[in-house]
Amino acid sequence: MIGLVLRGLSTRKLRSALTAIAILLGVTMISGTLVLTDQIDRAFVQIFQQGNSKIDVVVKQKPPFKDPQTEVFLNAELVTAVRAADGVQLAEPFIQVQGYVIVDGEPMDQTGGAPSFVFSSVSEELNPYSPIEGRLPTASGEIAIAKEIATKSKAKVGQAVTLATQDGIKPVKIVGIVQYGDGTTSLGGSTTVLAPLIDVQNWWSLQGKASYIYAKAKDGVSDDQLKANVRAALPQTDVIVQTGKEDADEQASVLNDLIGKIIRYALLAFAGVAVLVGAFIIYNTFSITVAQRTREFAMLRTIGASRRQILGTVVGEAFIIGSVASIIGIGLGLVFAWGLNKLFGAIGFGLPATGLILSWQTVVVALAVGVGITVLASIFPALRATKIAPIAALREGVTLPVGRFQKLTPALAIIIAVLGAAGMVFGLVSEADTTSRLLTLAGGAILIFVAVAMLARFIVRPVVGVLSVPITKVAGGVGKLASENAARNPARTAVTAAALMIGIGLVVFVTIFVGGLRESFTGAIDNSLKSDVTVTARGFGGSLPAGVLDAVKAVPGVETASPVGGTAAQVDGQTFALIGVDLATITDVYAFDWNDGSDEAVQSLGTDKALVEDAIATTLKLATGDSFTVQAISGESATFTVAGTYTDPTILNGFVVDQAALKPLLQSNATGLNTVFVTETPDSNPDTVQAALDEALKGYPTAQVQSNAQQKEEVASSVNTILVIFYALLALSVMISLFGIVNTLVLSIFERTREIGMLRSVGTTRRQLRAMIRWEAVITSIIGGVLGVLLGIMFGWAVCKGLESEGLSFVFPTVQIVIFLVLSIVAGIVAAILPARRAAKLDVLEALQYE
Amino acid sequence: MSTEITSTPSAVATDAVVVATDVSKIYGEGDSEVRALDGVSVSFPKGQLAAVMGPSGSGKSTLMHILAGLDQPTSGSVLVDGTELAGLNDQKLTLLRRDKIGFVFQFFNLLPMLTAKENIELPMKIAGTAPDPEWEATLVEATGLGTRLTHKPAELSGGQQQRVAVARALLSKPAVIFGDEPTGNLDSKTSSEVLALLRRAVDEFGQTVIMVTHDASAAAIADRTLFLRDGKIVRDAGHLSAGEILDTIKTLE
C-alpha cells in the first residue's frame, strides 16, 4: 500500500507540491521561531556566563518584589564584610547604569531596543572586559569604550569626549578600548562604556551604592564554599548571595523572559495561524482529490481492499506529504531564523547572536505539528473515501456519497460558533490571568473561523448570484460561466475562500486593534493633557536630573511647569505605579476624568491621601474613604486613604499622591522626577518656547522636549512599526491561502478537462478561457475577503469593547478595508495565473478524449 | 434456433461456484416500487463461461452486482464458493472479494500511475500476498503483454488495458470472475483479443467467468447464455451463435 501511495503522489506532482507548500510554510515559521529563540536564549546565557567567568560569588540586593523596569542597588559598604569572609581573595563593588558617550557631538547610543550601558570598571581579575588598546579607567574623568563604539565613532585612545549621565554631560577622556570576553560574543545592539566606580556613583546619584559586589575565591576554595562563607558573613536578609554561574543563569533567564519568550510566543501565534490556514487547504485538497478518485477507490474495494486500507491510502498520502513538507520546512526554518535575525538588526533591535541551533525539540515539535496537522486535516476526507461503495466502480458518473456528518454540518457549525463566541467573551471579561485569557480568546476566534468556514458554503450561491451580474457585464459569457463554475461546488469554493478569510480577517483585526491602541494614546493626549510641551527622560528606566525642573521654569514663555515622578509599588501582591505630582499645579496641566472626586480634592490631598485610577480601584475593590498600604520597590511602605477615583488607563495610570508623600518611598538614586508637563503663556510662540527649552536643557542629554503633536507622532510611528511587523507575519498566511486557491483551481481544471476541450472546440479562445479561470479565482477571493473583513471587524470591535477600560477604542478603518478588499481581488488574479495557463494550454483534441 | 430451456437445478449442482436462490431486489416502496430482480434462481458450475444478456433495465447488472456481493438482495440467498453472502459485514465481504472474486470492468479501471505489471499484481499487493511467479509468467504469456509490462495504462491501447485487467482478475486464481461489459468500450478487433483471453482462461485454466454484456459477439463465446427481462430469467441456453443470440434478443424486445 505504501508503494501505491508513493506512486500516486508522484503522478500528482503539482497537486502534491501545492498541498505540501500549504503546510510547509507554517512549519518553516514554527521551526524558524524555535531556532531563533533558542539562539537568543543561548546568546543570553553565553553573555552572562562570559560576564561572570572571572567572578566566583555575586552579592546583590533582594527587592521586596520584582519589577523588570527597576534596577535595585545595595549598600556598597557591604564589600568590607565580604572581604572579611573566609576564602575571599578579592571583592569589589560594581554598578551598571544607562548612559552613553558623545564623540564629536554624535551620541553613541542605541535608538532601538538594546540598552546603552555604563559599567563601573572593576579590576582586571574580575572584569569581563579586557583592554585591546590602552588600559582600564582608574582615575576620575577616565573612560574606556567598547570596540564596537570605537569602530563606529573612530574615537581614539587619548581623545577627549563627553559622557551623557543622569547628572548632565561630563567631560571625560578615553584611556582604553575594550572587548567583551574573548571578543567573539556579540552583545546585540547594546553599547558599553566603562568608567571608574566613583564617577558612576556621583553622576548617577548612587553615592555609597552598588549594583553588585563581586568576589573572587582564593585558590582551592570552591564557588559553593565561598558562597557559604560570604553568606555567613552577611546576615542581612535583604541581600542575595549567589555563585557567579547562578547569577548568570538567573540574569539570562530574566532577560529571556523579557525578550526571547515574547518573541517566541508572538511568532508562534502567527505560525499557528499559518498552520491553521494550511490545515484548511489540506482538508480541501484531500476532499477534492478523494471525490475525483471515487472510481479508483471503488475499484480498489472491488478487488479486495478493505475500508481500513482505503483510509490508509489517503492518510498515508497525507502522512508522506506532511513529513516531506515538515522536513523541508525545518530546513527553511533555519533560513527564516537567519533572515529574522538580520531583519531585527536592520530595524535597530539587534539581537545577540550565536550560531544557528537546531535542537531536537525543534525538530520534534515541527515534525509533530507538520505531520499531525496534515494527517488530521486529511481524516475527514479519508473517512468519506472509505464510504465509497465498491459498486461505484461499475457505474458511470458516480459522486461521493453524502456523509452522515455532512448533514449535521449546520447544526455542528452553530454549536462551534457558540462555543467560539463564549470563548471570546470569557477571554475578554474574565478575571483569570492574561495567558489563559489570551488563549481562550484565540481559541474562541479559531472556533469562529472554523464555524464560518463550515457555514460559508451556504452563502456561496447567493453571493455568486449577486457577483455574477457585474462580472457578466464586464466579462460577458465567460463571466457567466465563471460564476456558474464557482457556484458548482459551493463547499469547495467556501473552504478555499475560508483559508483566505482567516488571513484577511486577522489583518483587519490587527489594523483595528493597533488603531485602537494608537487612538488610546493620542486620545489620552488630546483629552487629558492641558499642557503644551512635555519633558521626559529618553530611553528606559528614565529619571530626570532634579535640575531639569528649575531649568524648565526659567525658560521665558513657560507659564506652568508641573513635575511628575513615580516608582513601582505593590498593593496586595500586585504591582502598580505610585505617581507623585505637584498638588498646586497638576490640575493646570492635566485634566482628571473624575468618577468620584473633583479638582478641589487634589489641593487637599496632603501626604496621606491618594487618588486611584478607576480600573485599579475596581481590581483592589477600593472606594473613596478606604485605606490601603503600598510597598515601594525601595522596601519602604506607606498607607493612604482614597480621596477620589478617576479614569486614565494611559498617562497617570496608578495611584496619584503628593510628591512629598512619594519622596520617602523612593530608592536613594531616584530623583522622583520623570516628567515635566509644561504650559506656555498665551502670548508666546510655541516654536520659540520649545527651542528655548531645548537650549535650556542642553546640559541634560537624557531630557527630551516634545510638543503634544510630536508625542502623538512618536506613538503613531511606533504603532506603525508594530503594524508593519504584524502585516508581514500575516502576509505568510495570506500567501498560503493563495496556494489554496491555486490548488483548488488546478484540481477543478483537471476534473473539467473534457469540458474545457468542449469549450475550446466550440470556439472559446485561450484568452477567454484564461479570463474564465481568473474570474473564478476572483469570485473565490472576494468571498474570502468579504468574510474576512466582516469577521475582522467583529473581532476588532469585540476586543476594543472588551478592553475599553484599558483605553482601547474602536475606530472603523474604512480606507484600509477598501485596500484589503482590492488586495484580495488582486490576490485572486495572481492565484489564477498558473491554473489559467495550464487550462489554456490543453490540447483540444486530447482534452475531449480525456477519460 | 433452439428454444428449449436448459434447466439447471441449482441446489443439486455440487460443483456450483455461484448459486443464487430466489433472489429478489426491490427498489422503492408502494406505487414507486421497482422489481429489479424477481425471484431469480440460478447456479453457475465451475469452469463455465456464462454470458448474461438482456435489454436495459432487465436486471442483468443488478443480478451481477448481487452475485458479486457488491449489492444486497431484498430477499433470497447467494452462495459464492460455498459462502452465504447474506448477513456478511463489510469486512467479510471485502475479504471474500479479495480471495474469491475477480472483476473485469467496462472502463478497465486501471490505476494510471502504476505500470501494467504493477496493475496486474495490485490485488495481491492489497491482500499482502506474493503472486506465484510461474502463474504470473503464464498469464503474461497468455495476455501477450510481455513487452508492455513496464508501460503505464496511458501508453497502452484499450485492448491491451483490458487484457491487463483480465490478468489482474486471474492472478489470484479467484473462484469466479465477473465481467461488466468487458468489451463495451472496445472496438471489434481488440474486443476479440479480450474475449479470446477470457475463453482461454476458462478452457486452459479452468476459471469460472460470468459476464454481463450487450454484445452478441461477446456472448457467442460463452458456454451458456442467460437472458433476463423484467427481473426474471426468460431463457437459459447453452452455447449460442451470435445470430441465435440476436434472434432471441429480438423476441425479448
Image: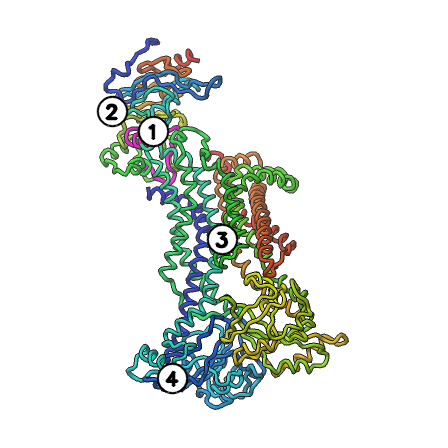
Circle 4 residue: A82
In the rendered view, tell whether residue A406 sits above or below residue A6.
above
| Nearest to the observer: residue A406 or residue A490 | A406
- Left or right of residue B23, residue A609 in this image: right
Q: Which residues are magenta?
A: B92-116
Task: Point out the frontmost of discs 1 and 4.
Answer: 4
Subunit under mark 1: B
- Left or right of residue A783, residue A118 in this image: left
| Nearest to the observer: residue A801 or residue A360 | A801
Residue B206's tag is 2
| Nearest to the observer: residue A463 or residue A719 | A719
Q: Position of residue B156 (x, y in %)?
A: 37, 35
Q: Local crowd at mark 2 within 10 Å, few (<14), some, or many (≥20)?
A: some
SS at badge 2: loop
Q: Quadrant of the N terminus of chain B?
A: top left
Residue visible at 64% across and 65% down?
A: A524
Circle 3 residue: A440
Subunit under mark 3: A
Q: Local crowd at mark 4 within 10 Å, few (<14), some, or many (≥20)?
A: many
Amino acid, disc 3: Thr
